[in-house]
Amino acid sequence: MQIFAPAEPSHYGGGVRANQGFFFVYDGLYWAMSPPQRATFGIDTAIFGNNQRNVWWGDPNDRGTSTQGSTLDTSFLQTGFMMGQRIEFGQMWEHAGWLFSYFQVHWLGQVHGARGVQAYFGDEEWGAAHLTHLEGNSGITGPVNLGVWFQDVSLVDAYRPWGTEFNFLVRTHPRERGGMWEWFFGARYLEFDEQFDVLASGPDPSTTGVNSILTRTQIHTFAKNHLFGPQLGLRWFITNDRWQFSATGKFLAGWNSQNVFEDGVLATDLVDSFPRSNNSPYALQMTNFSYVAHMSEFSPVVELRLEGQFQLTKNIYFHAGWNGMYIGNLARPPRMIDYTLRKTSVMGILTGNNNDLAFFDGFSIGIEINR
């Protein structure tokens, strides 16, 4: 148990021997995590070309019309750094051993607020009169399409990864120049969670002038990605005196079980009695919604680790390095919200947009105790 005994690096008989026995590693992580792909609040009107919807904004002279657009997206989301930790322990006997590893990175959250936001909602006919949800009375002519506008919008996005793995290790004989190889054969579980919230509000629809006919709309979307599968890895390391340098690569063929949850409420402030005042939808009422979707995808995971290690005492080592990890085919909520008002329901989940990605990279620093 003399873990603080002096180190005895020796070059006699071929150099310093590779460590054997039980080992424990603790690392602090400082990783940058990539945001999801850009998503529009509302439907991206670029897909409509010249066939966009013309809307009326409440001008009593019936001249206040324009093309409905979506003016806010998630381009504000940036790559951000967060802290985390990694714990590893295992045992090595000459050329065979095992390794258990666990890591987690804390939630990375970003918030953005905007004023004067338009949002294009898909609108389908409903009811016996064959009108759409957003049609209303201008007070001058017949039914008109009402514009969707919010005075204030807040977008919140937060996500984090964590995971665990178990590997059998196979160590080769030393190479001619002292380097050694270790193979990893095992299984790995990764989870990537992300939450995206929208809060949109504005003047009550009963007021005069431009108002928010869908005011106090709230959307909460949460996605959980469960990745599990076989893992193959390879590590090369070389020791010189008290120093050791290593490079590790791993590949996970992950089966990704995706669960996406969406709930919220549309147009909370549409509570005035019928018949509605001008510049209000004829019949649309406050409507809540709740959806769940389950999908499966193949999600490849590639990890690369480069480290340097210094022997402090007989059994204590200090190390630092760089980590990079790529995960493909993830369900990330911002692009999965369906902004459509249908015949019998509102909103929904775009299950076909479940193929986003994430990339993490950053630094690690920690200690290893090897018996």
Image (cartoon, rainbow, N blue to C red):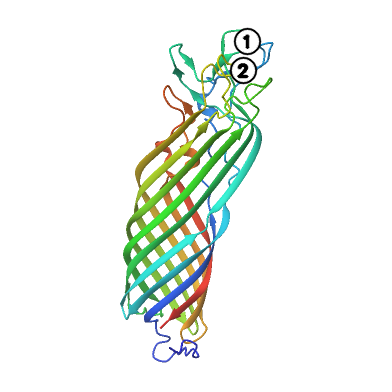
x, y percentage for residue 292?
A: 39, 39
Contact between marks 1 and 2 (CB within 8 A): the answer is yes
Query: Which residue sits furthest front?
Result: 273
Image quarter hosting the C terminus = bottom left
Residue at 52% x, 73% y is: 366
Q: Secondary structure at mark 2?
A: loop
x, y percentage for residue 266?
A: 52, 30
Q: Which mark is residue 180?
A: none
Q: Is residue 140 left or right of residue 335?
A: right
Residue at 52% x, 43% y is: 196
x, y percentage for residue 206?
A: 64, 21
Labels 1 and 2: the sequence-earlier one:
1
> Is residue 78 in sight in this rendering?
no
Tag 2: amino acid: Asn
**Crowding at mark 1 (Cα within 10 Å: few <14, some 14-19, many 20+):** some
**Crowding at mark 2 (Cα within 10 Å: few <14, some 14-19, many 20+):** many
Q: Quadrant of residue 90?
A: bottom left
Q: Where 136 sits versus 360, above or below?
A: above
> Is residue 22 in sight in this rendering?
yes
Residue sitting nearer the eye, 38 or 129: 129
Tag 1: amino acid: Gly
Cα separation, mark 1 vs mark 2, equals 8 Å
Mark 2 highlights which residue? 279
Q: Secondary structure at mark 1?
A: loop
Mark 1 highlights which residue? 139
x, y percentage for residue 302?
A: 41, 57
Q: Where 192 sits versus 197, above or below?
A: below
